[in-house]
Amino acid sequence: MSKTLGAIMLVLALASCSGGGSGKAPRELDNACSILQQRPGYLSAFRAAERKWGVPVHVQMATIYQESKFISNARTPFRYAAGVIPMGRQSSAYGYSQALDGTWKEYQRDQRKFSAKRDRIRDATDFMGWYMTTTQKRNGIPLTDARNQYLAYHEGHTGYARGNYNKKPWLVRVSGEVGARSNIYRQQISSCNVRR
């Protein structure tokens, strides 16, 4: 292998580790500092969304953890008939933010970001900022309230307003976990040795 080809391959390999769509989750998902140190591109994306939309980094991180475990190309599981015949995926949710096809298209139209992709961290965090800011306007949920923001993220703005989550004890439990993780991430980030 020539030195030039080897150098190009090395650069491409390093670039794929910087927060792009490698498809693999970072290690130590319970440690915000570790995640941000492993994927410097994440911090840049989180900060950009925080500046633009006002959604704190720790709220974004806790939501992405719950939705995709930081896996860029995450999808919902397949459904099976009679336990063996594949019937398609549970939903069209895809990427870091697990945005549905229709909601993603709405975001692209509204923000004029037609080339945005759900498996790119910067686009996924911008989407989350857009969605959560809309939630704040429509449902009155503060951007710092990870628990209720997650309920509205999962149920949709109308579903949240109707209280649909009250019929889903598992979702109420999960939203509490998102809120707790957000608080843990906030505390960890405050003491991280990461470039801000």
Image (cartoon, rainbow, N blue to C red):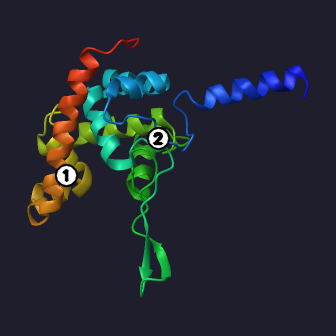
Locate residue 43 relative to residue 57 in the image: left or right.
right
Q: Is residue 166 above or below residue 48?
A: below
What count of labels does the image hold?
Answer: 2
Along the line of sight, which residue is nearer the eye, 142 or 109? 142
User: Percent from the top left, x then y, of residue 16?
Assistant: 61, 32
Q: Which residue is mark 1?
A: 174
Residue located 47% across and 79% down the image: 87
Q: Where, by quadrant of the figure, is residue 2 drawn?
A: top right
Q: Residue furthest front?
A: 28
Residue 115 in sight here: yes
Please rate how many residues cluster around mark 2, counting C-alpha atoms within 10 Å: few if below 14, some from 14 to 19, many from 20: some
Dot 1 lies on which element? helix
The mark found on residue 25 in the picture is 2
Along the line of sight, which residue is nearer the eye, 78 or 105? 78
Q: Tell me the quadrant of the picture where the C terminus can be found.
A: top left
Q: Is residue 96 above or below residue 122?
A: below
Dot 2 lies on which element? loop
Q: Where, by quadrant of the figure, is residue 145 drawn?
A: top left
Q: Is residue 44 above or below residue 183?
A: above
Distance (Cα) linking label 2 and label 1:
20 Å
Residue 146 in sight here: no
User: Percent from the top left, x then y, of residue 36?
Assistant: 41, 24
Residue located 36% across and 22% down the image: 47
Residue located 67% across and 30% down the image: 13
Residue type pointed to by label 1: Val
The mark found on residue 79 in the picture is none
Locate residue 131 relative to residue 11 in the image: left or right.
left
Residue type pointed to by label 2: Ala
Locate residue 22 relative to residue 141 in the image: left or right.
right
Along the line of sight, which residue is nearer the eye, 120 or 69? 69
